[in-house]
Amino acid sequence: MTELGFGMMRLPLVDENDQTSVDMEQVNKMVDAYMESGFNHFDTAYVYHEGVGEAAFRKSVVERYPRESFKISTKLPLFIITEDTPLEPIFAQQLENCGVDYFDYYLLHNVSGFTENAWKNVDLFSFIQKKKEEGFIKHIGLSTHGNAEFLEELLFDPPELEFVLLQINYLDWEDEGIESRKCLEVARKYNVPVMIMEPFKGGFLADVPEEAEKLMKEYDSDRSVISWAMRFVANLEGVSVVYTGASNMEQLESNIEEFKNADPLNDEELELLSEVSEIINSNITVDCTKCRYCVDSCTEDIDIAKVFDLYNKHKLLEKDDWTQFGNAYLNYSKLDGVGIASDCIECEACIEECPQQINIPEVLKDVAKTFETEIYGFTD
């Protein structure tokens, strides 16, 4: 039976420009609502919320609920690991951050070309297997945004992986870069259970273009836009958990309600989602899910995820003049210590970290042209 997991990547903030300013009062209420609804599976990571994500989990869950009442998944940060990196202190720090004696699920985080220096040159599998044998981990796995061929290489002759975390949603189902469908088929081939991340594609599938929403509502006026995305992932064979993130109580309550009412899609509805996908893809300017993996690598302190979000929303309005998102970009540009799009030096460090394979420096040029030149006429 598929579970609904609480993904803690995009928690509510006190200051929207400070990822470390997690609004713990809101998070506590959200955790309570989630647990009261009969769910108990949380997901976090060492790098979430610029390093405070695991501590936020501890404060909201561990310090308020008995250990046997919840399950926790977190990840070994391959981004920072080299041949010389001692693994024991990182793992010990994660146990302390989360406030637990063991992890229910522990993953190698974002196994990809960018992190191959870690997973190819460091015996990470033996390390996490040893931690499992010592009782610090119940189940071991990995997450990847790679395509089907890459995933098959990982699973062909693996250590005893017990699950994989994959990006799956109806928009990426037939995407040639992400290959959600083919990746799921590979996991099934090797009998490896799948956990799902990004079921709403970083929010894209919760706020679809008007034309796409019209198609959905004409077919079934009682269904919300988000219900289509939830029904798609909740009924896939071989899936054990669907992680949905939430940045406020309203989103969380919607996730819970839609999951509980996620009856399977019929063939006609699946065909409709193919049409919806075509519409969404034709409207998306930047395929960014706001995972923020790129942000820490930026030497110019550009909040890439934030400026891409504002850029996407601006473009969806189909206007070239002043917009609320242009104003939000101007406000962002006035913050201390932040870089703006035109500050990009094209070092390309961000590209390697992007799971969506976006040519970030090239897009930043368009962001700068749109917000800094066409709207406001400033370039520094």
Image: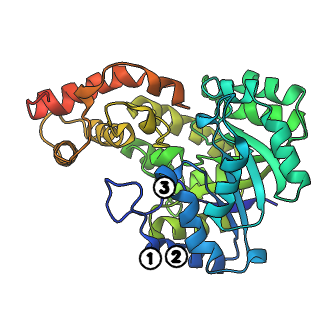
Q: Is residue 375 above or below residue 36?
A: above
At a point 51% along the width and 78% down the height, the residue shown is: 29
- Residue carrying label 3: 10
Kindly state the secondary structure of the residue where label 2 is placed: helix
Q: Quadrant of residue 84?
A: top right
Q: Quadrant of residue 78?
A: top right
Q: Is residue 237 above or below residue 26?
A: above
Identify the image quadrant of the N terminus. bottom right
Instruction: Name which of mark 3 and mark 1 comes first in the sequence.
Output: 3
Q: Count residues near mark 1 (Cα–Cα under 10 Å), then give few for <14, some for 14-19, many for 20+.
A: few
Label 3 – label 1 distance at C-alpha: 15 Å
Q: Count residues near mark 2 (Cα–Cα under 10 Å), then give few for <14, some for 14-19, many for 20+.
A: some
| Towards the viewer: 196 or 257 | 196
Side (left or right) of 253 relative to 89: left
Q: Count residues near mark 3 (Cα–Cα under 10 Å), then give few for <14, some for 14-19, many for 20+.
A: many
Identify the image quadrant of the C terminus. top left
At a point 51% along the width and 52% down the height, the residue shown is: 51
- Residue carrying label 1: 25
Kindly state the secondary structure of the residue where label 3 is placed: loop
Residue 46 visible from this viewpoint: yes
Task: Give the amino acid at mark 3.
Answer: Arg
At a point 64% along the width and 23% down the height, the residue shown is: 113
The percent coordinates of residue 298 (x first, y second) are: 39, 32
- Residue carrying label 2: 28
Label 2 – label 1 distance at C-alpha: 5 Å
Task: Give the amino acid at mark 2.
Answer: Asn
Asked if the residues shown at circle 2 and circle 1 are in contact, with their CB atoms under 8 angstroms apart, the answer is: yes
The percent coordinates of residue 251 (x first, y second) are: 48, 64
Side (left or right) of 92 relative to 80: right
At a point 78% along the width and 60% down the height, the residue shown is: 104
Task: Give the amino acid at mark 1.
Answer: Glu
Residue 234 visible from this viewpoint: no
